[in-house]
Image: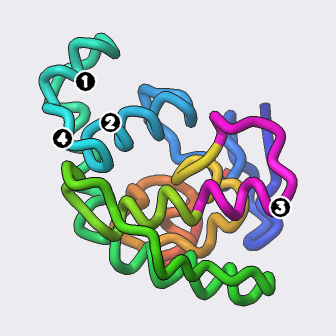
Amino acid sequence: MHVRCRACGTVETLFPPWLLPHEELTRDALNQVLEAVVHTGRPVSQVAAEWGLEPVAIRRRILRRLPHAAEFRQRVAQQADTWGIPLAWPTWTPPTASRSADWSWLLVAWTALFLILGGASAFSVGLPQWREWVPENLPVPVVPPWSHLGRRLRGLTPRPP
């Protein structure tokens, strides 16, 4: 499949601009793995065994995203405000096992946005869904620099088709 990038006019092969290449997991699986480790605090080795992955593969994804959870939270809140959707829940608190209160907030916020915007499936929420809705609103470090989107976010010239 070939897709022409609307932003820069280059032709991408196989992946549209909102999908990050070289992912071993589907959108839903990636979100479930991140939620299991970061949101509920389950051990990486246990989650890796359940999904048939190497623990290092999960740690690599978490290490790329977890440090930027606060920035993600800010960007999601700004985008929701742009859409006119308030994301304030004064009574909500993250799970006690959560390794990141920001990541826990994000999961709740993404789910709320998905439902408010008319999502059809409760399984398609979180970071993967956010990548489809507003791919340009991602913190640069979480996007691989060799990907088309990574090059665009960094202001680099896309590689020729």
Query: Residue 64 appears at what percent x and percent y?
Result: 27, 56
Looking at the rendered image, the disc whose residue lies closer to the viewer, 3 or 4, is: 3
Disc 1 to disc 3, C-alpha distance:
30 Å
Disc 1 to disc 2, C-alpha distance:
7 Å
Residue pictured at 63% horizontal, 34% vertical? 123
Query: Residue 118 appears at what percent x and percent y?
Result: 86, 53
Q: Which mark is residue 47?
A: 1
In the image, which residues are magenta? Answer: 110-124
- Type of amino acid under label 3: Leu
Disc 2 to disc 3, C-alpha distance:
25 Å
Mark 2, residue position:
36
Residue pictured at 44% horizontal, 34% vertical? 32
- Type of amino acid under label 4: Arg
Report whether residue 17 is seen: yes
Mark 4, residue position:
59
| Neighbourhood count class around disc 3 (C-alpha, 10 Å): few under 14, some 14–19, many 20 upward | few
- Type of amino acid under label 2: Ala
Left or right position of 81 against 146: right
Mark 3, residue position:
117
Is 136 a magenta residue? no
Colouring scheme, one of rainbow, by chain, secondary structure, one colour: rainbow
Label 3: element kind? loop
Disc 1 to disc 4, C-alpha distance:
11 Å
Which circle's residue, 1 or 2, is located before the other in the chain? 2
Asked whether the beta carbons under mark 1 and mark 2 sit within 8 Å of each other, the answer is yes
